Amino acid sequence: MITGTETVLVVLAFALLVGGVVGSLIPQVPGALLSLAGVYVYWYAVGLPLVVLVGLTLVGVLTWVVDFFGGAVAARVGGASTTTAVVAGIVGLLLFFVTGPVGLILGVAATVFAVEFWRQQDAKQGMRAALVTTAGMLASSVVQALLTGSILVTMLVVAL
């Protein structure tokens, strides 16, 4: 029998799990960490089989890695230098708080283009790096949403 406290914790766990999926689509919101918090709150409240707990933890860590490195990997694939990726990451973080997610994406794209154009004196290469970086950031969000969504679905199956 689940007690009142356990019920509150289960509701909190699922709120965190849903927040993880939503957060994975919003830049700078730690969707993976919210999902993992939901898993562990649920585990604390009513328990989980060890294999499920370990499996979901691994998926959560993978999601966090995709979140943390996705944009930088996309920038490098697009031909941007490490310096460009770092500068774009800093600009993106600052712009997120001023302009929100759209400003972050546009700001990162503009920063990658500007730094790569300055570095290589090649507008075509700067544009390529900016486009690949932007596409990579968006793809990273989709992958994160799929992974955090899989954590949520697994938890729903376990809870039912």
Image: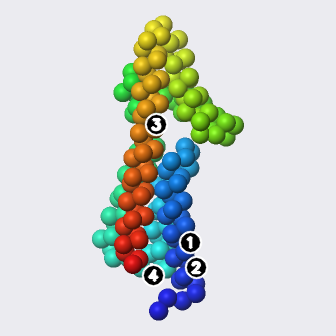
Query: Mark 1 = which residue?
Result: 12
User: How far is mark 3 from mark 4, CA to CA?
Assistant: 36 Å
Residue type at mark 4? Val
Task: Tell me the element at label 3.
Answer: helix
Of discs 1 and 4, which sits in the foreground? 1
Residue at position x 45%, y 44% in the image? 141
User: How far is mark 2 from mark 3, CA to CA?
Assistant: 36 Å
Residue type at mark 1? Leu
Query: Mark 4 = which residue?
Result: 46
Direction top: furthest residue: 121
Query: Mark 2 = which residue?
Result: 8
In this rendering, does residue 83 appear at all? no
Q: Is residue 35 above or below residue 92?
A: below
Residue at position x 47%, y 23% in the image? 130
Image quarter hosting the C terminus: bottom left
In this rendering, does residue 129 appear at all? yes
Of discs 2 and 4, which sits in the foreground? 2
Assess whether mark 3 and mark 1 are in contact (beta carbons under 8 angstroms).
Answer: no
Residue type at mark 2? Val
Query: Mark 3 = which residue?
Result: 137
Q: Are there few (<14), some (14-19), or many (20+) residues within 10 Å of tag 2? A: few
Of discs 3 and 4, which sits in the foreground? 3
Considering only order in the chain, which callout, 4 or 3, is on the residue closer to the N terminus? Answer: 4
Considering only order in the chain, which callout, 4 or 2, is on the residue closer to the N terminus? Answer: 2
Q: Are there few (<14), some (14-19), or many (20+) residues within 10 Å of tag 4? A: some
